[in-house]
């Protein structure tokens, strides 16, 4: 690859043959002598050079990026100056005021005034996505320059086109922005003077707005009035008191009320009214015979007949069925005045078919059908052909939008319209789907294009076509661009030519406008190049796709040269430009000499901008090269470091121990999971949940070790959900079979979770075949274990640990019977203990999840399992009540409580039982349903220790609410304590909850050498404190406390160590202090670093990370 000119020296040759050997070394070499010592020194030197190269690459990239920023800033200033110069020479400055005002009238066709904020859940009619000024074009135009402002203020028609959108709320005072809204409306009404108003009014709310009186005061000059909203204008006789002498167009449709006679009675004196939009034509004082345009939204087909009979002079008809099913009617007669028909399809039943089958319109020349926006509408082909034949109409404009029809159906329809001049087809699918299904058809195909092609000696389809618009949203697969070009060329000839005369004699016309748009494909500009020539000859052509105009700029690979700026941006002549832009206009805005000078400056500015673009491209090319080269250097450096990694020198035995620690669980989960949430949420690539598979894919050595150690493949966690996807099910079973095969005969650790209702699962067959080597089995699911028949028939000779849990069913007697011959079973976790021939007496560890349980139930369980040493109690119900039970259990040495509720179940156990041999006690609390931590049973605990006379050496509290004084009192009754861990809960002090990790606790743990009787936990070996609550804490006191409990074993003062041990005092060995709410000052804990170097294990961490 040729590199561009760069200004850095590359030290590491990535293409040398010596480094090419690196790949083989990485895949094969390992052991104490993976590289020779001399070779290792050489590789370290190469690594140092690679580090310097990477640093140089970063510096060079930063320098080039800064240079690009400078060039782009300079280019932006040039473009701004160039735009100002062009604006000064712009032809629009030379336009007469009359032409400029004509342009303003086109732009200012609508000024949207909308209340803010919009106090309704319903969306406003106009969604404001740009600055508000863009929706007020008359206001925007009057703010451009002095001339435009004068013109805008002198033409009241610009301010007379208003769209007022109002949202009012009941029982709310007017917001502060309402005054601004009213002022803006008043300003528009004032500047429109007496010009006839075009008003569109939308009211959302149950009460009229304060701006409504301002609008009604100008009702005498309403020319066009359109109303929509949830407020009836007949309330308080708002309209009945007004007169509308200039009203020409009226559209009234309330969302909450149908149009009544009282609505139209208000307009009985509007003699100029000829266009009406309504949802009903009730009998009223209004003269319907003066209407020639009707926009009719109806519920029933019979209403259309009534409306046509009421309006005998009607010419333009737009039908929009709403709400109801548009039933078929019998023939309703011939209506000779209708020249334009627009049908908006119904969402329940196509309305166009009924209209075409029931009515005749002999004078019709414009026909438009638009599909419903939520349901694709089918084209009524037979009804349309019959309609054209009966009506004998000459349709010149034909438009279909969102209608499903084939190309053959469209061709048939066009064949009965020989006088067609304007054709528009838009196959838009309103459900945002760009792929054709069996229910969706698009007529815009190559077959349609070939039929539209004009032949000089034969009768063509639509021979008089003047304009063609094809908008394709549905992906039809292929489209013949060349056929489209040939079709357009066959219909084009220059006006006033001999060919034009000959074609006119044959009844053919020249096409004048062609529009082709695709929403699913890109357009190749070169293919449509022939149409550019026709566009230059006078044909209007628009061809668009998903891609825009693309410019290809060739990059310069030469050395960087300083840009020669031709245009001086600080010259005094150009500084005056801003003033000229704001004030000068007219035919002689600049003299011919000045215009010539400005043209030269513009040409120079164009050259400067072009060279700036080339310079930016050249610099970008250099940056891309440097980044690619840096990436290769980083890869090479990583490989070299891997070759020198201490991991390669580890013996196989040590490496296998690491693998065993990492591969404790391999997750196999059904996919897709058809329930809402699987037990384990997959957030990383699936290989990360299969550590053994990942380890075996790293290199040849790791793969050999993994395959030679079956224990790595014997730890499985399976989450199964019945699925009908055979492909993914086959993949799951293949992976399971691979793990079972590679685990050989090693005892399995299986965690099985089955959800869903299926009971015959293929994966269970492979697991059941290996039941003879299950050593640990954990089961959970919606059904009990024996629900799956294939598992209930197995025997488990090497099973040692068993955990049965069903989320929707109790553990059944039959579940236990499967394990009565498991002679090695020593650990059991369950929520029920039914009487049967189970090896309860051989258990030494018991996890009891109690539901509706009492102390007597717990006593029964412990009596049944007479050899249990480790007892874990988990209460699943807040009420731990029932008859009291007392008992002494000498075998229990470890006791753990899993708390879920504010009232601790340990309190009842402490009052009821005694455990003389207990040396380990742990209470874990999770947040209860009331979101309150468990309360510490202080009195019950002290009474329990006293009655049991036990020597507790390990004490752990997690998530409990207790004060520092309560914890100190508990520690005083445990003089033999060796290991202490406190993890406090997030408490709410306003509810009286407390946390124990305070400066008071720390001072109490400080060892006093003068008195042995007052020392708390004098034999303490390890201390772990995790604080989650904001409470005063003395860092210096904590450091001093640790120093008071530490002495260096084996030091010169070993006689002191022996004396201290003789006094019954122990040396602390491990300290962990973590804060979840504050940062750690490393300087305050600096003395502990010295102790850490002497042998004390110290970890101090806060929100700013580990500091010691």
Image (tube, rainbow, N blue to C red):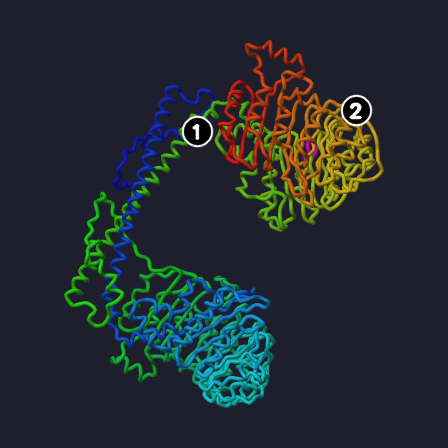
- Of the image marks 1 and 2, the number of the one nearer the N terminus: 1
The residue to which callout 2 is attached is 890
Q: Secondary structure at mark 2?
A: loop
For mark 1, does the 10 Å Cα neighbourhood hold few (<14), some (14 to 19), or many (20 or more) residues?
A: few
The local secondary structure at tag 1 comes to helix
Residue 260: percent from left, percent from top = 58, 83
Which of the pair 494/627 is nearer the observer? 627
Q: Is residue 366 above or below residue 673?
A: below
Q: Residue at x 23, y 66 (%)?
A: 89
Front-most of 192 and 716? Answer: 192
Regarding residue 442, the answer to whether it shows in the image is no
Residue 642: numbered disc: 1
452 inside magenta stretch:
no
Image quarter in which the N terminus is found: top left
Label 2: how many Cα within 10 Å (few below 14, some 14–19, many 20+): some
Residue interval drawn in magenta: 769-776
């Amino acid at each position: 690859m040729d590199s561009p000119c760069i200004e850095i020296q590359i030290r590491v040759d990535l293409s040398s043959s010596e480094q090419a050997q690196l790949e083989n070394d990485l895949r094969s070499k390992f052991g104490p002598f993976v590289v020779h010592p001399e070779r290792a020194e050489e590789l370290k030197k190469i690594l140092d050079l690679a580090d310097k190269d990477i640093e140089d690459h970063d510096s060079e990239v930063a320098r080039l990026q800064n240079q690009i920023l400078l060039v782009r800033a300079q280019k932006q200033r040039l473009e701004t100056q160039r735009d100002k110069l062009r604006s000064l020479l712009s032809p629009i400055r030379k336009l007469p005021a009359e032409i400029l005002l004509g342009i303003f009238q086109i732009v200012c066709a609508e000024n949207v005034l909308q209340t803010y904020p919009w106090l309704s859940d319903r969306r406003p009619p106009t969604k404001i996505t740009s600055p508000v000024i863009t929706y007020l074009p008359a206001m925007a135009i009057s703010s451009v320059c002095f001339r435009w402002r004068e013109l805008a203020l002198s033409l009241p028609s610009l301010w007379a086109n208003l769209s007022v959108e109002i949202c009012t709320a009941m029982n709310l005072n007017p917001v502060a922005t309402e005054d601004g809204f009213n002022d803006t409306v008043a300003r528009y009404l004032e500047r429109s003077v007496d010009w006839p108003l075009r008003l569109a009014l939308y009211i959302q709310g149950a009460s009229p707005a304060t701006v409504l009186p301002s609008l009604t005061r100008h009702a005498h000059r309403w020319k066009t009035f359109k109303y929509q909203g949830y407020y009836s204008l007949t309330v308080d006789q708002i309209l009945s008191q007004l007169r509308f002498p200039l009203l020409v167009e009226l559209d009234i449709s309330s969302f909450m009320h149908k149009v009544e006679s009282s609505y139209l009675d208000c307009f009985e004196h509007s003699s100029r009214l000829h266009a009406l939009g309504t949802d009903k034509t009730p009998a009223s004082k209004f003269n319907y015979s003066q209407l020639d345009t009707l926009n009719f939204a109806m519920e029933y087909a019979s209403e259309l007949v009534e409306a046509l009979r009421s309006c005998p002079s009607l010419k333009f008809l737009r039908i929009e069925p709403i709400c109801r099913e548009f039933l078929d009617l019998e023939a309703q007669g011939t209506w000779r005045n209708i020249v334009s028909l627009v049908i908006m399809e119904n969402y329940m039943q196509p309305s166009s078919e009924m209209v075409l089958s029931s009515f005749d319109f002999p004078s019709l020349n414009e026909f438009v059908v638009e599909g419903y926006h939520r349901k694709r509408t089918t084209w009524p082909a037979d009804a349309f052909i019959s309609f054209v034949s009966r009506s004998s109409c000459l349709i010149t404009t034909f438009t279909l939008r969102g209608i499903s029809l084939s190309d053959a159906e469209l061709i048939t329809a066009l064949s009965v319209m020989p006088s067609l001049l304007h054709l528009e087809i838009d196959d838009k699918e309103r459900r945002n789907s760009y792929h054709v299904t069996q229910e969706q058809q698009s007529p815009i195909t190559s077959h349609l294009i070939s039929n539209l092609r004009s032949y000089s000696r034969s009768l063509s389809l639509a021979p008089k076509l003047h304009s063609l618009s094809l908008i394709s949203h549905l992906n039809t697969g292929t489209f013949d661009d060349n056929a489209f070009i040939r079709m357009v060329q066959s219909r084009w000839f220059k006006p006033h030519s001999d060919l034009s005369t000959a074609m006119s004699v044959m009844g053919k016309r020249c096409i004048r406008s062609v529009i082709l748009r695709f929403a699913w494909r890109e357009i190749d500009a070169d293919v449509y190049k022939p149409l550019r020539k026709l566009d230059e000859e006078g044909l209007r052509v628009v061809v668009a796709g998903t891609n825009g105009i693309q410019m290809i700029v060739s990059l310069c690979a030469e050395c960087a040269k300083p840009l020669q700026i031709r245009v001086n941006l600080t010259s005094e002549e150009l500084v005056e430009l801003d003033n000229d832009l704001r004030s000068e206009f007219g035919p002689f805005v600049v003299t011919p000499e000045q215009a010539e000078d400005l043209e030269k400056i513009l040409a120079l500015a164009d050259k400067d901008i072009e060279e700036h673009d080339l310079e930016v491209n050249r610099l970008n090319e250099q940056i891309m090269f440097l980044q690619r080269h840096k990436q290769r250097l980083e890869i090479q450096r990583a490989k070299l470091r891997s070759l020198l990694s201490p991991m390669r020198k580890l013996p196989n035995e040590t490496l296998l121990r690491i693998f065993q620690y990492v591969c404790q669980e391999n997750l196999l989960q059904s996919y897709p999971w058809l329930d809402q949430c699987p037990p384990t949420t997959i957030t990383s690539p699936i290989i990360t949940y299969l550590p053994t598979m990942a380890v075996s894919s790293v290199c040849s050595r790791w793969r050999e070790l993994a395959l030679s150690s079956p224990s790595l493949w014997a730890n499985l966690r399976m989450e199964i959900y019945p699925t009908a996807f055979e492909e993914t099910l086959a993949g799951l079973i293949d992976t399971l079979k691979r793990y079972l095969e590679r685990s050989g005969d090693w005892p399995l650790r299986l965690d099985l979770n089955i959800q869903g209702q299926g009971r015959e699962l293929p994966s269970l067959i492979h697991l059941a075949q290996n039941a003879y080597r299950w050593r640990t089995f954990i089961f959970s699911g919606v059904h009990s274990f024996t629900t799956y028949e294939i598992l209930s028939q197995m025997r488990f000779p090497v099973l040692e640990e068993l955990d049965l849990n069903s989320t929707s069913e109790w553990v059944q007697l039959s579940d236990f019977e499967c394990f009565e011959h498991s002679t090695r079973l020593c650990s059991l976790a369950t929520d029920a203990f039914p009487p049967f021939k189970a090896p309860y007496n051989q258990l030494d560890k018991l996890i009891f999840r109690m539901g509706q349980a009492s102390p007597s139930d717990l006593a029964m369980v412990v009596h049944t399992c007479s050899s249990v040493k480790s007892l874990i109690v988990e209460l699943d119900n807040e009420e731990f009540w029932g008859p009291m039970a007392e008992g002494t259990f000498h075998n229990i040495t470890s006791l753990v409580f899993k708390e879920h509720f504010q009232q601790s179940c340990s309190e009842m156990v402490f009052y009821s039982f005694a455990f003389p041999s207990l040396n380990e006690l742990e209470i874990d609390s999770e947040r209860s349903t009331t979101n309150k931590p468990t309360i510490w049973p202080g009195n019950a605990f002290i009474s329990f220790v006293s009655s049991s006379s036990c020597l507790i050496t390990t004490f752990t509290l997690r998530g409990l609410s207790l004060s520092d004084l309560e914890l100190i009192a508990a520690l005083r009754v445990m003089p033999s304590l060796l290991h202490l861990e406190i993890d406090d809960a997030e408490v709410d002090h306003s509810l009286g909850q407390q946390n124990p990790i305070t400066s008071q606790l720390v001072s109490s743990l400080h060892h006093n050498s003068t008195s042995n009787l007052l020392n708390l936990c004098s034999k303490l070996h390890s201390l772990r404190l995790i604080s989650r609550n904001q409470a005063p804490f003395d860092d210096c006191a904590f450091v001093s406390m640790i120093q008071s409990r530490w002495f260096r074993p084996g030091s010169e003062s070993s006689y002191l160590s022996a004396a201290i041990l003789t006094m019954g005092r122990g040396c602390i060995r491990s300290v962990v202090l973590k804060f979840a709410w504050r940062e750690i000052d490393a300087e305050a804990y600096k003395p502990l670093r010295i102790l850490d170097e002497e042998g004390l294990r110290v970890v101090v961490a806060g929100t700013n990370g580990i500091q010691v």
